[in-house]
Image (tube, coloured by chain):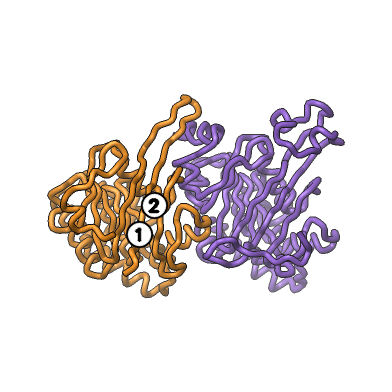
Amino acid sequence: MTGSERLESPGPAGGAPMLRVEKLSVRYGQGCPRCLSGDPGSLERNYCPECGAVWALSDVSFEVYPGEVLGIVGESGSGKSTVMNCLYFNLEPTGGRARIGAYDGGSADVFGLSLQEKRHIRNSLLGIVYQNPTNGLKMGFSSIANVAEKLIAAGNRNVGRMEARARDLLGRVSIPSARMKDAPANFSGGMQQRVQIAKALSSNPPVLLLDEVTTGLDLSVQAKVLDLIKGLQRELGISMVLVSHDLGVVRMLADRTVVLLDGRVIETGLTDQILEDPQRPYTQELVHSML
Amino acid sequence: MTPVLRVENLGKSFTVHELGKTIRACHGVSMTIMPGEFVGITGRSGSGKSTVLKMIYRTYVPDEGRVLYDSARFGTIDLCETDERSILYLRKREIGYVSQFLNLIPRTTARSTIEEAALDMGRSAPEAREEAEALLSHFELPPELWDSFAATFSGGEKLRLNIARAMVKHPRLLLLDEPTASLDDYSKGKVRDLIERLKGEGTTMLGIFHDLEFMQGLCDREYAMSAGNFTKRADVLAGAAS
Protein backbone atom coordinates (compact mmCIF):
# COMPACT_ATOMS: atom_id res chain seq x y z
CA MET A 1 0.00 0.00 0.00
CA THR A 2 1.19 3.49 -0.77
CA GLY A 3 1.01 6.56 1.37
CA SER A 4 -1.06 8.46 -1.15
CA GLU A 5 -3.89 5.93 -1.08
CA ARG A 6 -7.23 7.50 -0.25
CA LEU A 7 -9.78 6.15 2.17
CA GLU A 8 -12.63 4.39 0.45
CA SER A 9 -15.61 2.34 1.42
CA PRO A 10 -16.06 -1.10 -0.11
CA GLY A 11 -19.86 -1.11 -0.20
CA PRO A 12 -22.54 0.64 -2.22
CA ALA A 13 -23.30 3.09 0.61
CA GLY A 14 -19.99 4.77 -0.29
CA GLY A 15 -18.36 7.51 1.72
CA ALA A 16 -14.92 7.35 3.24
CA PRO A 17 -14.28 6.13 6.78
CA MET A 18 -13.37 8.76 9.37
CA LEU A 19 -10.91 6.39 10.96
CA ARG A 20 -9.21 3.33 9.54
CA VAL A 21 -6.91 1.21 11.69
CA GLU A 22 -4.82 -1.38 9.88
CA LYS A 23 -2.86 -4.24 11.44
CA LEU A 24 -2.24 -2.49 14.71
CA SER A 25 0.21 -4.40 16.92
CA VAL A 26 1.69 -3.69 20.31
CA ARG A 27 4.41 -5.98 21.59
CA TYR A 28 6.16 -5.89 24.95
CA GLY A 29 9.50 -7.68 24.68
CA GLN A 30 11.97 -8.35 21.91
CA GLY A 31 10.04 -10.96 20.01
CA CYS A 32 11.59 -13.97 18.29
CA PRO A 33 11.23 -15.68 14.92
CA ARG A 34 8.40 -17.76 16.31
CA CYS A 35 6.14 -14.91 17.43
CA LEU A 36 7.25 -12.45 14.77
CA SER A 37 5.95 -14.84 12.12
CA GLY A 38 2.50 -13.44 12.82
CA ASP A 39 0.99 -16.91 12.89
CA PRO A 40 -1.87 -16.78 15.44
CA GLY A 41 -0.98 -20.32 16.56
CA SER A 42 2.49 -19.24 17.68
CA LEU A 43 1.17 -17.54 20.84
CA GLU A 44 -0.37 -18.93 23.98
CA ARG A 45 -3.18 -16.46 24.42
CA ASN A 46 -1.16 -13.26 23.85
CA TYR A 47 2.13 -14.59 25.17
CA CYS A 48 5.02 -16.11 23.23
CA PRO A 49 6.14 -19.26 25.09
CA GLU A 50 9.55 -19.12 23.40
CA CYS A 51 10.78 -15.60 24.09
CA GLY A 52 8.26 -14.41 26.66
CA ALA A 53 7.07 -11.43 24.62
CA VAL A 54 3.55 -10.22 25.31
CA TRP A 55 1.50 -9.20 22.28
CA ALA A 56 -1.04 -6.77 23.74
CA LEU A 57 -2.42 -6.30 20.22
CA SER A 58 -1.87 -8.37 17.08
CA ASP A 59 -3.07 -7.25 13.65
CA VAL A 60 -6.08 -5.28 14.85
CA SER A 61 -7.95 -3.66 11.97
CA PHE A 62 -11.27 -1.79 11.88
CA GLU A 63 -12.99 1.23 10.40
CA VAL A 64 -15.27 3.89 11.80
CA TYR A 65 -17.46 5.88 9.42
CA PRO A 66 -18.63 9.47 9.88
CA GLY A 67 -21.37 9.62 12.49
CA GLU A 68 -20.94 5.96 13.36
CA VAL A 69 -20.39 4.43 16.80
CA LEU A 70 -18.08 1.42 16.82
CA GLY A 71 -18.15 -0.74 19.93
CA ILE A 72 -15.09 -2.68 21.07
CA VAL A 73 -15.87 -5.44 23.54
CA GLY A 74 -13.80 -8.09 25.24
CA GLU A 75 -12.70 -9.23 28.66
CA SER A 76 -10.18 -7.42 30.84
CA GLY A 77 -6.74 -7.71 29.30
CA SER A 78 -8.06 -8.29 25.78
CA GLY A 79 -6.42 -5.08 24.58
CA LYS A 80 -9.38 -2.69 24.45
CA SER A 81 -7.72 0.17 26.28
CA THR A 82 -4.43 -0.43 24.47
CA VAL A 83 -6.24 0.33 21.20
CA MET A 84 -7.48 3.61 22.67
CA ASN A 85 -4.06 4.54 24.03
CA CYS A 86 -2.48 3.97 20.64
CA LEU A 87 -5.13 6.04 18.88
CA TYR A 88 -4.66 8.92 21.31
CA PHE A 89 -0.86 8.65 20.91
CA ASN A 90 -0.34 7.77 24.56
CA LEU A 91 1.39 4.61 23.44
CA GLU A 92 3.53 3.98 20.39
CA PRO A 93 2.42 0.86 18.52
CA THR A 94 4.94 -1.74 17.42
CA GLY A 95 3.33 -1.99 14.02
CA GLY A 96 0.35 -0.96 11.98
CA ARG A 97 -1.18 2.18 10.58
CA ALA A 98 -4.07 4.50 11.29
CA ARG A 99 -5.57 7.06 9.01
CA ILE A 100 -8.04 9.79 9.88
CA GLY A 101 -10.41 11.08 7.22
CA ALA A 102 -10.27 14.62 8.61
CA TYR A 103 -6.46 14.73 8.40
CA ASP A 104 -4.85 15.17 5.01
CA GLY A 105 -7.83 13.55 3.30
CA GLY A 106 -7.06 10.29 5.10
CA SER A 107 -3.89 9.65 3.12
CA ALA A 108 -1.33 9.82 5.93
CA ASP A 109 -0.48 7.13 8.46
CA VAL A 110 -0.84 9.17 11.64
CA PHE A 111 1.44 6.86 13.64
CA GLY A 112 4.30 7.84 11.35
CA LEU A 113 3.91 11.60 11.87
CA SER A 114 6.15 13.92 13.87
CA LEU A 115 5.41 14.53 17.53
CA GLN A 116 4.26 18.02 16.68
CA GLU A 117 1.75 16.76 14.10
CA LYS A 118 0.52 14.09 16.51
CA ARG A 119 -0.04 16.78 19.11
CA HIS A 120 -1.99 18.81 16.59
CA ILE A 121 -4.21 15.81 15.75
CA ARG A 122 -4.76 14.97 19.39
CA ASN A 123 -5.67 18.54 20.27
CA SER A 124 -7.95 19.35 17.38
CA LEU A 125 -9.23 16.14 15.80
CA LEU A 126 -9.57 13.78 18.75
CA GLY A 127 -11.30 13.75 22.10
CA ILE A 128 -10.98 11.08 24.76
CA VAL A 129 -12.92 10.16 27.86
CA TYR A 130 -11.13 7.75 30.18
CA GLN A 131 -12.66 5.33 32.64
CA ASN A 132 -10.66 6.99 35.36
CA PRO A 133 -11.26 10.78 35.40
CA THR A 134 -7.84 11.39 36.97
CA ASN A 135 -6.31 10.35 33.63
CA GLY A 136 -8.27 12.95 31.72
CA LEU A 137 -8.59 15.84 34.16
CA LYS A 138 -6.39 17.96 36.41
CA MET A 139 -8.36 17.24 39.54
CA GLY A 140 -7.20 20.33 41.45
CA PHE A 141 -7.97 22.89 38.72
CA SER A 142 -11.40 24.38 38.10
CA SER A 143 -13.67 22.65 35.59
CA ILE A 144 -13.54 25.69 33.34
CA ALA A 145 -9.73 25.57 33.43
CA ASN A 146 -9.83 21.87 32.52
CA VAL A 147 -11.90 22.56 29.43
CA ALA A 148 -9.79 25.63 28.61
CA GLU A 149 -6.65 23.52 28.75
CA LYS A 150 -7.74 21.63 25.65
CA LEU A 151 -8.86 24.86 23.98
CA ILE A 152 -5.43 26.40 24.59
CA ALA A 153 -3.76 23.26 23.26
CA ALA A 154 -5.87 23.61 20.12
CA GLY A 155 -4.51 27.12 19.64
CA ASN A 156 -7.07 29.38 21.34
CA ARG A 157 -5.71 32.39 23.21
CA ASN A 158 -8.65 34.67 23.96
CA VAL A 159 -9.47 34.17 27.65
CA GLY A 160 -12.97 35.63 27.50
CA ARG A 161 -14.00 33.50 24.56
CA MET A 162 -12.50 30.36 26.06
CA GLU A 163 -14.37 30.89 29.31
CA ALA A 164 -17.62 31.42 27.42
CA ARG A 165 -17.05 28.23 25.40
CA ALA A 166 -16.14 26.26 28.52
CA ARG A 167 -19.28 27.49 30.28
CA ASP A 168 -21.40 26.60 27.28
CA LEU A 169 -19.97 23.06 27.11
CA LEU A 170 -20.21 22.48 30.85
CA GLY A 171 -23.81 23.68 30.68
CA ARG A 172 -24.57 21.15 27.98
CA VAL A 173 -23.30 18.34 30.15
CA SER A 174 -25.44 19.72 33.00
CA ILE A 175 -22.77 21.04 35.33
CA PRO A 176 -24.57 23.82 37.26
CA SER A 177 -23.06 27.29 36.61
CA ALA A 178 -22.40 27.73 40.30
CA ARG A 179 -20.06 24.74 40.26
CA MET A 180 -18.15 25.43 37.08
CA LYS A 181 -15.31 27.07 38.93
CA ASP A 182 -15.05 24.14 41.34
CA ALA A 183 -12.34 21.55 40.90
CA PRO A 184 -13.38 18.08 39.70
CA ALA A 185 -11.76 16.69 42.86
CA ASN A 186 -14.86 17.96 44.67
CA PHE A 187 -17.30 16.36 42.21
CA SER A 188 -19.10 13.04 42.15
CA GLY A 189 -17.92 10.35 39.71
CA GLY A 190 -20.75 11.08 37.27
CA MET A 191 -19.99 14.81 37.28
CA GLN A 192 -16.31 14.12 36.70
CA GLN A 193 -17.20 12.02 33.65
CA ARG A 194 -19.38 14.84 32.36
CA VAL A 195 -16.52 17.34 32.75
CA GLN A 196 -14.30 14.93 30.82
CA ILE A 197 -16.92 14.77 28.06
CA ALA A 198 -17.15 18.59 27.93
CA LYS A 199 -13.38 18.80 27.69
CA ALA A 200 -13.20 16.13 25.00
CA LEU A 201 -15.82 17.94 22.90
CA SER A 202 -14.29 21.40 23.26
CA SER A 203 -12.36 21.34 20.00
CA ASN A 204 -15.34 19.91 18.04
CA PRO A 205 -13.39 16.75 17.27
CA PRO A 206 -14.65 14.51 14.45
CA VAL A 207 -13.51 11.45 16.45
CA LEU A 208 -14.32 10.75 20.08
CA LEU A 209 -12.72 7.88 22.02
CA LEU A 210 -14.75 6.58 24.95
CA ASP A 211 -12.91 4.14 27.22
CA GLU A 212 -15.25 2.39 29.69
CA VAL A 213 -16.94 5.71 30.43
CA THR A 214 -19.73 4.31 32.56
CA THR A 215 -17.80 1.62 34.40
CA GLY A 216 -17.92 2.16 38.11
CA LEU A 217 -20.79 4.64 38.03
CA ASP A 218 -24.05 3.72 39.70
CA LEU A 219 -26.95 2.83 37.44
CA SER A 220 -28.88 6.10 37.40
CA VAL A 221 -25.70 8.09 36.80
CA GLN A 222 -24.69 5.62 34.11
CA ALA A 223 -28.01 6.18 32.36
CA LYS A 224 -27.52 9.96 32.40
CA VAL A 225 -24.02 9.74 30.95
CA LEU A 226 -25.28 7.38 28.23
CA ASP A 227 -28.20 9.72 27.45
CA LEU A 228 -25.72 12.55 27.11
CA ILE A 229 -23.48 10.60 24.74
CA LYS A 230 -26.44 9.43 22.67
CA GLY A 231 -27.78 12.98 22.42
CA LEU A 232 -24.41 14.43 21.43
CA GLN A 233 -23.91 11.73 18.85
CA ARG A 234 -27.27 12.43 17.25
CA GLU A 235 -26.81 16.18 17.36
CA LEU A 236 -23.17 16.47 16.32
CA GLY A 237 -22.71 13.32 14.25
CA ILE A 238 -19.32 12.58 15.83
CA SER A 239 -17.65 9.27 14.99
CA MET A 240 -17.08 7.36 18.21
CA VAL A 241 -15.04 4.40 19.32
CA LEU A 242 -16.67 2.98 22.41
CA VAL A 243 -14.75 0.51 24.52
CA SER A 244 -16.81 -1.33 27.09
CA HIS A 245 -17.09 -4.69 28.73
CA ASP A 246 -20.78 -3.90 29.36
CA LEU A 247 -22.73 -5.34 26.44
CA GLY A 248 -25.82 -3.36 27.47
CA VAL A 249 -23.94 -0.12 26.86
CA VAL A 250 -22.72 -1.39 23.51
CA ARG A 251 -26.21 -2.54 22.54
CA MET A 252 -27.59 0.91 23.28
CA LEU A 253 -24.94 2.96 21.50
CA ALA A 254 -22.91 1.03 18.96
CA ASP A 255 -23.89 0.52 15.31
CA ARG A 256 -21.20 -2.07 14.75
CA THR A 257 -19.09 -4.05 17.19
CA VAL A 258 -15.64 -5.59 17.21
CA VAL A 259 -14.85 -8.43 19.62
CA LEU A 260 -11.29 -8.59 20.96
CA LEU A 261 -9.72 -11.62 22.58
CA ASP A 262 -6.06 -11.82 23.60
CA GLY A 263 -5.25 -8.77 21.51
CA ARG A 264 -6.87 -10.04 18.31
CA VAL A 265 -10.11 -9.21 16.55
CA ILE A 266 -12.00 -12.49 16.59
CA GLU A 267 -15.35 -11.28 15.32
CA THR A 268 -16.91 -8.16 13.89
CA GLY A 269 -20.45 -7.36 12.81
CA LEU A 270 -23.59 -5.33 13.26
CA THR A 271 -24.17 -4.96 17.00
CA ASP A 272 -27.50 -6.79 16.96
CA GLN A 273 -25.90 -9.60 14.95
CA ILE A 274 -23.00 -9.96 17.38
CA LEU A 275 -25.48 -10.10 20.27
CA GLU A 276 -28.09 -12.36 18.67
CA ASP A 277 -26.04 -14.58 16.37
CA PRO A 278 -22.50 -14.65 17.74
CA GLN A 279 -20.30 -16.99 15.73
CA ARG A 280 -17.13 -17.63 17.70
CA PRO A 281 -17.06 -19.70 20.89
CA TYR A 282 -15.70 -16.80 22.94
CA THR A 283 -18.30 -14.35 21.63
CA GLN A 284 -21.04 -16.84 22.45
CA GLU A 285 -19.66 -17.24 25.95
CA LEU A 286 -19.57 -13.46 26.37
CA VAL A 287 -23.11 -12.94 25.07
CA HIS A 288 -24.57 -15.88 26.96
CA SER A 289 -23.11 -14.57 30.20
CA MET A 290 -25.10 -11.39 29.68
CA LEU A 291 -28.45 -13.09 29.13
CA MET B 1 -41.73 -5.40 -12.54
CA THR B 2 -38.72 -6.03 -10.29
CA PRO B 3 -39.57 -7.90 -7.10
CA VAL B 4 -38.82 -5.94 -3.93
CA LEU B 5 -37.48 -9.09 -2.36
CA ARG B 6 -36.29 -12.36 -3.80
CA VAL B 7 -35.13 -14.93 -1.28
CA GLU B 8 -33.26 -17.84 -2.81
CA ASN B 9 -32.47 -21.08 -1.08
CA LEU B 10 -31.80 -19.50 2.28
CA GLY B 11 -30.45 -21.76 5.00
CA LYS B 12 -29.26 -21.33 8.56
CA SER B 13 -27.89 -23.49 11.35
CA PHE B 14 -26.91 -22.34 14.80
CA THR B 15 -23.81 -23.83 16.34
CA VAL B 16 -23.74 -23.64 20.12
CA HIS B 17 -20.07 -24.23 20.85
CA GLU B 18 -20.49 -24.63 24.59
CA LEU B 19 -22.93 -27.49 24.15
CA GLY B 20 -21.23 -28.89 21.06
CA LYS B 21 -24.52 -28.77 19.20
CA THR B 22 -25.65 -27.57 15.81
CA ILE B 23 -29.30 -26.81 15.32
CA ARG B 24 -30.69 -26.50 11.84
CA ALA B 25 -33.19 -23.63 11.87
CA CYS B 26 -34.20 -23.52 8.22
CA HIS B 27 -33.08 -24.61 4.80
CA GLY B 28 -33.96 -24.11 1.16
CA VAL B 29 -36.25 -21.16 1.85
CA SER B 30 -37.21 -19.29 -1.31
CA MET B 31 -39.84 -16.66 -1.95
CA THR B 32 -40.55 -13.68 -4.15
CA ILE B 33 -42.39 -10.56 -3.08
CA MET B 34 -43.60 -7.97 -5.55
CA PRO B 35 -43.95 -4.24 -4.81
CA GLY B 36 -46.95 -3.44 -2.63
CA GLU B 37 -47.64 -7.03 -1.69
CA PHE B 38 -48.44 -8.16 1.80
CA VAL B 39 -47.10 -11.64 2.32
CA GLY B 40 -47.68 -13.66 5.44
CA ILE B 41 -45.68 -16.52 6.94
CA THR B 42 -47.55 -18.92 9.16
CA GLY B 43 -46.41 -21.94 11.07
CA ARG B 44 -45.92 -23.35 14.53
CA SER B 45 -43.49 -21.94 17.05
CA GLY B 46 -40.00 -23.12 16.27
CA SER B 47 -40.69 -23.72 12.60
CA GLY B 48 -38.15 -21.08 11.60
CA LYS B 49 -40.38 -18.10 10.75
CA SER B 50 -38.49 -15.49 12.78
CA THR B 51 -35.17 -16.90 11.59
CA VAL B 52 -36.15 -16.08 8.02
CA LEU B 53 -37.15 -12.53 8.95
CA LYS B 54 -33.99 -11.97 10.96
CA MET B 55 -31.81 -13.21 8.12
CA ILE B 56 -33.47 -10.73 5.77
CA TYR B 57 -32.76 -7.97 8.33
CA ARG B 58 -29.20 -9.37 8.76
CA THR B 59 -29.52 -9.83 12.50
CA TYR B 60 -28.74 -13.44 11.69
CA VAL B 61 -26.00 -14.39 9.28
CA PRO B 62 -27.31 -16.95 6.76
CA ASP B 63 -25.16 -20.01 5.98
CA GLU B 64 -26.33 -20.24 2.40
CA GLY B 65 -28.59 -18.60 -0.10
CA ARG B 66 -29.25 -15.07 -1.23
CA VAL B 67 -31.59 -12.25 -0.27
CA LEU B 68 -31.94 -9.99 -3.28
CA TYR B 69 -33.49 -6.70 -2.30
CA ASP B 70 -34.43 -3.95 -4.73
CA SER B 71 -33.18 -0.83 -2.97
CA ALA B 72 -34.34 2.66 -3.97
CA ARG B 73 -30.76 3.85 -3.58
CA PHE B 74 -28.53 0.91 -4.50
CA GLY B 75 -30.63 -1.05 -7.00
CA THR B 76 -30.80 -4.82 -6.50
CA ILE B 77 -28.31 -6.01 -3.88
CA ASP B 78 -27.77 -9.22 -1.95
CA LEU B 79 -28.42 -8.41 1.68
CA CYS B 80 -26.39 -11.46 2.75
CA GLU B 81 -23.29 -10.19 1.00
CA THR B 82 -23.38 -6.41 1.16
CA ASP B 83 -21.27 -4.50 3.66
CA GLU B 84 -22.55 -3.55 7.11
CA ARG B 85 -22.48 0.13 6.30
CA SER B 86 -25.05 -0.35 3.54
CA ILE B 87 -27.21 -2.49 5.83
CA LEU B 88 -27.18 0.29 8.42
CA TYR B 89 -28.25 2.77 5.74
CA LEU B 90 -31.09 0.51 4.59
CA ARG B 91 -32.28 -0.01 8.16
CA LYS B 92 -32.38 3.72 8.64
CA ARG B 93 -34.06 4.57 5.39
CA GLU B 94 -35.72 1.65 3.65
CA ILE B 95 -36.29 -1.48 5.71
CA GLY B 96 -38.33 -1.46 8.89
CA TYR B 97 -38.61 -4.23 11.45
CA VAL B 98 -41.24 -4.56 14.13
CA SER B 99 -41.00 -7.39 16.59
CA GLN B 100 -43.16 -8.70 19.36
CA PHE B 101 -40.39 -7.76 21.74
CA LEU B 102 -40.65 -4.25 23.02
CA ASN B 103 -37.11 -3.09 22.77
CA LEU B 104 -37.79 0.59 23.26
CA ILE B 105 -34.88 2.80 24.13
CA PRO B 106 -34.74 3.45 27.87
CA ARG B 107 -35.30 6.98 29.11
CA THR B 108 -36.76 8.15 25.82
CA THR B 109 -40.22 9.68 25.61
CA ALA B 110 -42.89 8.35 23.29
CA ARG B 111 -42.70 11.55 21.28
CA SER B 112 -38.94 11.46 20.75
CA THR B 113 -39.00 7.73 19.98
CA ILE B 114 -41.01 8.54 16.84
CA GLU B 115 -39.38 11.91 16.15
CA GLU B 116 -35.91 10.37 16.14
CA ALA B 117 -36.98 7.80 13.56
CA ALA B 118 -38.34 10.61 11.36
CA LEU B 119 -35.14 12.65 11.82
CA ASP B 120 -33.16 9.60 10.70
CA MET B 121 -35.08 9.82 7.44
CA GLY B 122 -33.79 13.35 6.97
CA ARG B 123 -37.00 15.18 7.86
CA SER B 124 -36.79 18.62 9.43
CA ALA B 125 -37.47 19.00 13.15
CA PRO B 126 -40.95 20.59 12.67
CA GLU B 127 -41.95 17.90 10.16
CA ALA B 128 -40.77 15.16 12.48
CA ARG B 129 -42.77 16.69 15.31
CA GLU B 130 -45.90 16.95 13.22
CA GLU B 131 -45.67 13.36 11.98
CA ALA B 132 -44.95 12.05 15.46
CA GLU B 133 -48.04 13.77 16.82
CA ALA B 134 -50.21 12.50 13.98
CA LEU B 135 -49.16 8.92 14.67
CA LEU B 136 -49.50 9.25 18.43
CA SER B 137 -53.06 10.47 17.88
CA HIS B 138 -53.86 7.74 15.41
CA PHE B 139 -52.78 5.12 17.89
CA GLU B 140 -54.87 6.85 20.53
CA LEU B 141 -52.02 7.14 22.94
CA PRO B 142 -53.31 9.58 25.55
CA PRO B 143 -51.57 12.97 25.09
CA GLU B 144 -50.49 12.95 28.74
CA LEU B 145 -48.27 9.98 27.86
CA TRP B 146 -46.59 11.59 24.87
CA ASP B 147 -43.87 13.10 26.97
CA SER B 148 -43.43 10.15 29.33
CA PHE B 149 -40.80 7.46 29.07
CA ALA B 150 -42.04 4.79 26.68
CA ALA B 151 -40.38 2.03 28.66
CA THR B 152 -42.97 2.57 31.41
CA PHE B 153 -45.98 1.98 29.12
CA SER B 154 -48.33 -1.00 29.11
CA GLY B 155 -47.62 -3.83 26.68
CA GLY B 156 -50.25 -2.69 24.18
CA GLU B 157 -49.10 0.93 24.28
CA LYS B 158 -45.47 -0.08 23.77
CA LEU B 159 -46.39 -2.23 20.83
CA ARG B 160 -48.38 0.52 19.18
CA LEU B 161 -45.43 2.85 19.68
CA ASN B 162 -43.07 0.26 18.22
CA ILE B 163 -45.22 0.06 15.11
CA ALA B 164 -45.56 3.85 14.92
CA ARG B 165 -41.79 4.17 15.05
CA ALA B 166 -41.42 1.84 12.07
CA MET B 167 -44.31 3.44 10.19
CA VAL B 168 -43.16 7.02 10.44
CA LYS B 169 -40.40 6.07 8.04
CA HIS B 170 -42.85 4.84 5.40
CA PRO B 171 -40.38 2.03 4.72
CA ARG B 172 -40.06 0.44 1.33
CA LEU B 173 -40.09 -2.97 3.02
CA LEU B 174 -41.57 -3.64 6.43
CA LEU B 175 -40.85 -6.87 8.30
CA LEU B 176 -43.41 -7.72 10.97
CA ASP B 177 -42.55 -10.40 13.51
CA GLU B 178 -45.83 -11.18 15.24
CA PRO B 179 -46.64 -7.55 15.97
CA THR B 180 -50.07 -8.42 17.30
CA ALA B 181 -49.04 -11.14 19.71
CA SER B 182 -50.45 -10.38 23.16
CA LEU B 183 -52.64 -7.51 21.97
CA ASP B 184 -56.32 -7.22 22.77
CA ASP B 185 -58.82 -7.12 19.91
CA TYR B 186 -59.22 -3.38 20.02
CA SER B 187 -55.48 -2.76 19.74
CA LYS B 188 -55.24 -5.37 17.02
CA GLY B 189 -57.83 -3.41 15.09
CA LYS B 190 -55.67 -0.30 15.41
CA VAL B 191 -52.65 -2.15 14.09
CA ARG B 192 -54.72 -3.54 11.26
CA ASP B 193 -55.90 -0.04 10.30
CA LEU B 194 -52.33 1.10 10.02
CA ILE B 195 -51.18 -1.90 8.08
CA GLU B 196 -54.02 -1.27 5.65
CA ARG B 197 -53.01 2.35 5.37
CA LEU B 198 -49.38 1.39 4.70
CA LYS B 199 -50.58 -1.06 2.10
CA GLY B 200 -52.53 1.75 0.50
CA GLU B 201 -49.30 3.77 0.37
CA GLY B 202 -47.60 0.90 -1.46
CA THR B 203 -45.39 -0.43 1.35
CA THR B 204 -44.32 -4.00 0.74
CA MET B 205 -44.73 -6.13 3.84
CA LEU B 206 -43.65 -9.53 5.04
CA GLY B 207 -45.22 -10.57 8.29
CA ILE B 208 -45.46 -13.44 10.72
CA PHE B 209 -48.81 -13.85 12.40
CA HIS B 210 -50.19 -16.58 14.58
CA ASP B 211 -53.61 -15.06 14.32
CA LEU B 212 -55.03 -16.40 11.08
CA GLU B 213 -58.19 -14.37 11.49
CA PHE B 214 -56.11 -11.21 11.57
CA MET B 215 -54.51 -12.13 8.29
CA GLN B 216 -57.83 -12.74 6.56
CA GLY B 217 -58.42 -10.16 3.88
CA LEU B 218 -55.11 -8.46 4.65
CA CYS B 219 -52.64 -10.93 3.23
CA ASP B 220 -52.22 -11.23 -0.49
CA ARG B 221 -50.36 -14.49 -0.21
CA GLU B 222 -49.26 -16.80 2.50
CA TYR B 223 -46.39 -19.19 3.01
CA ALA B 224 -46.85 -21.92 5.57
CA MET B 225 -43.71 -23.05 7.27
CA SER B 226 -42.86 -26.23 9.08
CA ALA B 227 -39.56 -27.77 10.15
CA GLY B 228 -37.53 -24.96 8.62
CA ASN B 229 -39.06 -24.95 5.17
CA PHE B 230 -42.08 -23.71 3.30
CA THR B 231 -44.85 -26.15 2.62
CA LYS B 232 -46.49 -24.22 -0.14
CA ARG B 233 -50.23 -23.98 -0.21
CA ALA B 234 -52.47 -23.88 -3.23
CA ASP B 235 -53.37 -20.25 -2.67
CA VAL B 236 -49.69 -19.41 -2.43
CA LEU B 237 -48.87 -21.07 -5.70
CA ALA B 238 -51.87 -19.51 -7.40
CA GLY B 239 -50.80 -16.00 -6.52
CA ALA B 240 -47.06 -16.49 -6.58
CA ALA B 241 -45.00 -14.31 -8.83
CA SER B 242 -42.07 -16.08 -10.40
Q: Position of residue A39 (x, y in %)?
A: 73, 36
Chain identifier of the orange chain: B
Tell me what residue is drawn at x 76 percent, y 50 percent.
A96
- Foreground tag (2 vs 1): 1
Q: Chain of mark 2?
A: B
Residue carrying label 2: B56
Q: Which mark is residue B5?
A: 1
At label 2, which amino acid type do we have?
Ile
Local packing at callout 2 (Cα closer than 10 Å; few below 14, some 14-19, many 20+) is many
Q: Position of residue B86 (x, y in %)?
A: 50, 61
Nearest to the observer: residue A236 or residue A269:
A269
Quarter of image, res A21: bottom right
Left or right of residue B200: residue A81: right
At label 1, which amino acid type do we have?
Leu
Total label count? Answer: 2
Nearest to the observer: residue A262 or residue B222:
B222
Left or right of residue B147: residue A215: right
> Which colour represents chain A?
purple
Give the distance between the C-alpha atoms of the residues marked 2 and 1, in whole angstroms: 9 Å
- The local secondary structure at tag 2 comes to helix
Residue A149 is at least partly visible in this image: no
The quarter of the image holding the N terminus of chain A is bottom right
Tell me what residue is drawn at x 53 percent, y 59 percent.
B85
Q: Position of residue B98 (x, y in %)?
A: 32, 53
Quarter of image, res B132: bottom left
Asked if the residue at tag 1 contacts the one at tag 2, i.e. Cβ–Cβ closer than 8 Å, the answer is yes
Q: Position of residue A182 (x, y in %)?
A: 66, 55
Nearest to the observer: residue B46 or residue A160:
B46
| Vertical position of residue A220 compared to residue A237: above or below | above
